């Protein structure tokens, strides 16, 4: 099946530093693809690049973003504006902050539908029902402050999907929510991807969320993809030392309590500290001179599973 | 854990904290909570936002005045204590907060911040203070020369180490931690959790560990209490709570926490809790959980379940003996 979204060689720079460097992935219709990583790994700025909403100081210096086969990087803003909400939509971490506090939620969903009058109201009603909002006829005229965080996230999902986009970019959609509400929203996203065939790019820092919902995952570190593959393969057989250590650093319900967790020494480098080689070299137990000098390319280790590491065989 | 002879490091009895609202009824943040923490024990307090867990923590260190009930630190009551006694209690009970950005004064060197509690209490100065600060810094995995730097020169994980060093300066008998690792990235969180487990062993210190993360709480705590809408719903030794949760809310929390293992996670039964947490200004009658409980019956809507023992567990549920719905 043709990809709903195909990103290749995406490079984003602030000043002279590539804060996102050669990022490539694709997402099929109905598929959930996760970009996972710690703060500063470039996952959120990648999401904004997909929407062509990069903030001032960030420039795209290379790469293509194909949305249903069409390269959106060369489109003028006027044309891009027509695509947002209809071909590609985005939802954000803090639903209450992302909605307009002065406008009833129904109007905000309706605005994205491109419809008017009774037809719009009907479409909004259907959409609010589809995202699981109880009593939609009452909610339609309420303001965001009258709704809980989980409900606001449902409203944001409704307004993102009412234009039937091919791609939904979800940036930490459940991070601000409680765990029981998070479970509801993840179930909703899973169902919408399956029923509507929406391709979802899920940006998250939470390996539990990835394990729950994503079919494929790209692990990002300091602006580059360290490892990409099916979620089952990456979790069962991580082939990048960063992925392996990250997974071992998470306390799990099956662990021995108070046992020592794996540690990645130091902290994530700032963009100004990026060296010429592998950006994980400074914290990697396998690093040698080669790693510090030359960035490892992303190479396929098994079908559909690729790793950017000179020493990946040491994890096999 | 608590023997009848020893005084617990912390005793909370029928604690009630209501916040007045400008319009309408007060917010019943904490509505009758009792528990104790033994010497050297770590008690986890888990629940979702608005359940009252942070208010309990704040009441324990005297940052919030209880509406009713009692808090005793090493046997000394906090409410009604004289300023002098309160000062002594505050030395024994120290707090670590979640928000690293506001926990340290940006214009104070790290050494001054860590040494301040010792200095204001006249416990050390000059060379002795410097030596003590250096020792505290090494204890939390930093270097003595870090004392002359400012907070902005440190990463998030290092700042949390500094905050912990400051909390340890007065050798407290009780450490109250409110979401101490929630703002940290996974790799850094592991460093701080390892440090925390080391400190539990090296310091004869009790700890109240407030968190929303069940896996983190299981990793560091000896016993675990679960809070919902101002009430404790279950309290049990760690292994009992995770292996045989007695309250339907505890089971729902465990089911909702996503495990970082795709095979385990996808095999889990999917019974997400319906609905939202009611407002603590208008809690439901009867059992506060009945509006979302898969097992609720007529009795749950009318009668408040009593806090009662069931094996090693304390639980507030009419149907705690029954198997899950």
Image (spheres, rainbow, N blue to C red):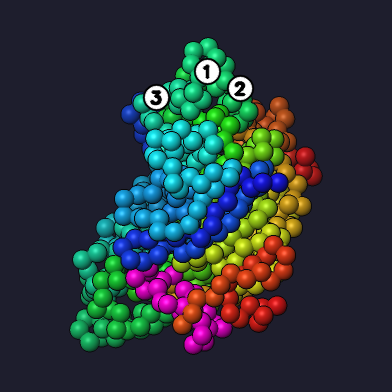
Label 1 SS: helix
Residue highlighted by disc 3: A103
Instruction: Categorize mark 2 by other alpha carbons within 10 Å: few (<14), some (14-19), many (20+).
Output: some
Give residue A120's mark: 1
Q: Do the CB atoms of the residues marked 1 and 2 lie less than 8 Å apart?
A: no
Q: Residue furthest right?
A: B323
Query: Which region of the structure is painted magenta?
Result: A268-292
Residue highlighted by disc 2: A126
Is label 3 on the same chain as label 1? Answer: yes
Is label 1 on the same chain as label 2? Answer: yes
Of the two numbered discs 1 and 2 in the rendering, the one whose residue sits closer to the viewer: 1
- Residue B87: where, in percent of width, then height? 29, 63
Q: Judge by depth and name the residue closer to the eye, B229 or B18.
A: B229
Q: Do the CB atoms of the residues marked 3 and 2 lie less than 8 Å apart?
A: no
Instruction: Categorize mark 3 by other alpha carbons within 10 Å: few (<14), some (14-19), many (20+).
Output: few
Give the chain of mark 2: A
Residue B307: tell me if it is visible: no
Q: Is residue B321 left or right of residue A75?
A: right
Instruction: Categorize mark 1 by other alpha carbons within 10 Å: few (<14), some (14-19), many (20+).
Output: some
Task: Using the image, determine if residue A121 lies above or below residue A153.
Answer: above
Give the chain of mark 3: A
Tell me where residue A272 sits by quadrant.
Answer: bottom left
**Disc nearer the start of the sequence (1/2):** 1
Is label 3 on the same chain as label 2? Answer: yes
Of the two numbered discs 3 and 1 in the rendering, the one whose residue sits closer to the viewer: 1
Q: Verify whether residue B248 appears in magenta.
A: no
């Amino acid at each position: 099946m043709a990809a709903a979204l195909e990103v290749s060689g995406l490079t984003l720079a602030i000043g002279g530093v590539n804060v996102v460097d050669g990022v490539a992935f694709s997402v099929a219709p109905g598929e959930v693809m996760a970009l996972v990583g710690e703060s500063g790994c470039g996952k959120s700025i990648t999401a904004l690049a997909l929407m062509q909403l990069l903030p001032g100081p960030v420039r795209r210096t290379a790469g293509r973003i194909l949305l249903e086969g069409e390269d959106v990087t060369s489109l003028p803003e006027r044309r891009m504006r027509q695509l947002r909400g209809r071909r590609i939509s985005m939802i954000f971490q803090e639903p209450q902050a992302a909605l307009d506090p002065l406008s009833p939620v129904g109007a905000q969903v309706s605005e994205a539908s491109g419809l008017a009058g009774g037809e719009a109201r009907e479409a909004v009603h259907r959409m609010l029902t589809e995202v699981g909002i109880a009593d939609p006829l009452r909610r339609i005229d309420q303001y965001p402050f009258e709704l809980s965080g989980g409900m606001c996230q449902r409203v944001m999902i409704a307004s993102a999907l009412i234009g039937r986009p091919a791609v939904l970019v979800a940036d930490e959609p459940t991070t601000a929510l409680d765990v029981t509400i998070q479970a509801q929203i993840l179930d909703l996203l899973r169902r919408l991807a399956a029923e509507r065939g929406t391709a979802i790019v899920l940006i998250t820092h939470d390996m539990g969320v990835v394990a729950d919902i994503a079919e494929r995952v790209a692990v990002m570190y300091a602006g580059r993809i360290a490892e990409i593959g099916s979620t089952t393969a990456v979790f069962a057989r991580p082939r990048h030392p960063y992925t392996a250590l990250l997974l071992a650093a998470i306390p799990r319900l099956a662990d021995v309590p108070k046992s020592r967790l794996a540690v990645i020494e130091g902290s994530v480098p700032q963009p100004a500290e990026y060296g010429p080689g592998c950006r994980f070299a400074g914290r990697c137990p396998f690093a040698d001179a080669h790693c510090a000098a030359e960035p490892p390319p992303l190479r396929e280790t098994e079908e559909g599973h690729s790793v950017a590491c000179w020493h990946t065989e040491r994890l096999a | 854990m608590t023997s009848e002879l020893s005084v617990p490091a912390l005793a909370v009895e029928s604690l009630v904290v209501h916040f007045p609202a400008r319009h309408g009824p007060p917010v019943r943040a904490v509505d009758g909570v009792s528990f104790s923490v033994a010497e050297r024990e770590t008690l986890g307090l888990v629940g979702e936002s608005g359940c009252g867990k942070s208010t309990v923590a704040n009441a324990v260190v005297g940052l919030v005045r209880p509406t009713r009930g009692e808090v005793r630190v090493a046997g000394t009551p906090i409410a009604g204590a004289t300023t002098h006694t309160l000062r002594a209690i505050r030395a024994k009970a120290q707090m670590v907060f979640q928000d690293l950005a506001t926990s340290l004064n940006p214009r104070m060197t790290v050494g001054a911040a860590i040494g301040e509690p010792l200095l204001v209490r006249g416990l050390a100065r000059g060379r002795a203070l410097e030596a003590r600060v250096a020792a505290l810094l090494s204890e939390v995995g930093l270097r003595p020369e870090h004392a002359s730097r400012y907070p902005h020169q440190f990463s998030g994980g290092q700042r949390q180490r500094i905050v912990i060093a400051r909390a340890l300066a007065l050798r407290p008998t009780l450490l109250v931690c409110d979401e101490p690792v929630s703002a940290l990235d996974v790799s850094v969180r592991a460093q701080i959790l390892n440090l925390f487990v080391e400190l539990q062993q090296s310091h004869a210190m009790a700890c109240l560990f407030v968190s929303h993360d069940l896996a983190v709480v299981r990793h560091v705590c000896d016993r675990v209490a679960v809070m919902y809408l101002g009430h404790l719903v279950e309290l049990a030794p760690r292994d009992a709570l995770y292996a045989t949760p007695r309250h339907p809310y505890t089971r729902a929390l465990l089911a909702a926490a996503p495990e970082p293992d795709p095979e385990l996670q996808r095999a889990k039964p999917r019974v997400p809790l319906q609905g939202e947490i009611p407002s603590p200004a208008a809690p439901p009658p009867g059992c506060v959980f009945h509006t979302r409980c898969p097992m609720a019956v007529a009795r749950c809507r009318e009668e408040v379940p009593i806090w009662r023992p069931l094996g090693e567990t304390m639980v507030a549920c009419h149907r705690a003996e029954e198997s899950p719905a």
